[in-house]
Image (cartoon, rainbow, N blue to C red):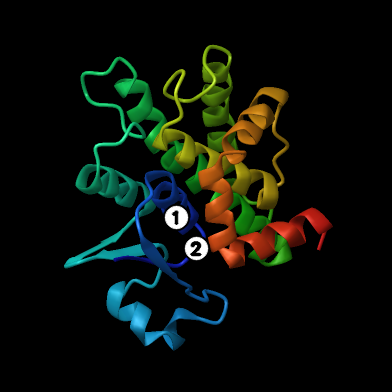
Amino acid sequence: MITVWGEGRGFRVVWLLEEMGLPYRLRPVDMLAGVENDPEFLAVNPAGFIPAIQDGDVTMIESIAILEYLMARHGPTPLAPAPADPAFPAYQQFLHLGEAGLATPIFFVLNARNRAPLAERDNWSARHAQDVFDSRLGIVTRRLAHAPYMAGETFTAADISVTYALELAQRAGGVTLGEAEQAYVDRTSARDGYQRAMDRCEGTKAWVARVKAGA
């Protein structure tokens, strides 16, 4: 049985597991309460961030690495095009762009805007991170002008990566998605696997409901 520790970026992992039909258990990690109060989790990831997984004797961190591991270890799966597939280069590019180019910079923006002291919220680093996010979002926009999904005509794990980042930016980063990006998110989030993942991730589901309610 695969154990997923924590939601947040762990939503990507749960969504993938639902798409692949693999059994797992989700172990919540309360980051707001402080991971120092969760010695069981710290034994899995002493660095104290989520997500992490355990799969037999394997322990892993970093959501994109976890996705790649699960597809390689428990595949094959159409969620990961083979290297000889013409879709493979775009798949690889957007799988990693979803984290490195989108989720990471917007994470620093939303932390600066929502958690930094008032005098430090509009700082050079936050503005630069926003510029990085905006430039990478342009890559997604241009891709969607030619294909419905990041790897082409078929949904892949690259879409799990990118959709998570776009929803994070929209819900917490103050980003308004364009028509093409919103249609894309509507398309990917309508999948049964996404809906099952949202039902399993109770903390994420509650947070999304609060955002929609304007709380």
The image position of residue 88, as x and y in percent, is 30, 23
The image position of residue 39, as x and y in percent, is 36, 86
Apparent side of residue 192 relative to residue 116 in the rendered image (left or right): left
Q: CA distance from mark 2 to mark 1?
A: 8 Å
Q: In the rendered view, would you say 117 is above or below 92?
A: below
How packed mark 1 is, by other alpha carbons closer than 10 Å (few <14, some 14-19, many 20 or more), is many
Q: Nearer the viewer, residue 121 or 29?
A: 29
Element on which disc 1 rests: helix
At a point 60% along the width and 61% down the height, the residue shown is 204
Q: Mark 1 and mark 2 in contact (Cβ < 8 Å)?
A: yes
Which residue in the structure is indicated by mark 1? 14
Q: Amino acid at mark 1?
A: Val
At a point 63% along the width and 54% down the height, the residue shown is 110
Quarter holding the C terminus? bottom right
Q: Nearer the viewer, residue 70 or 124?
A: 70
Which residue in the structure is indicated by mark 2? 7
Image quarter for residue 82?
Answer: top left
Quarter holding the N terminus? bottom left
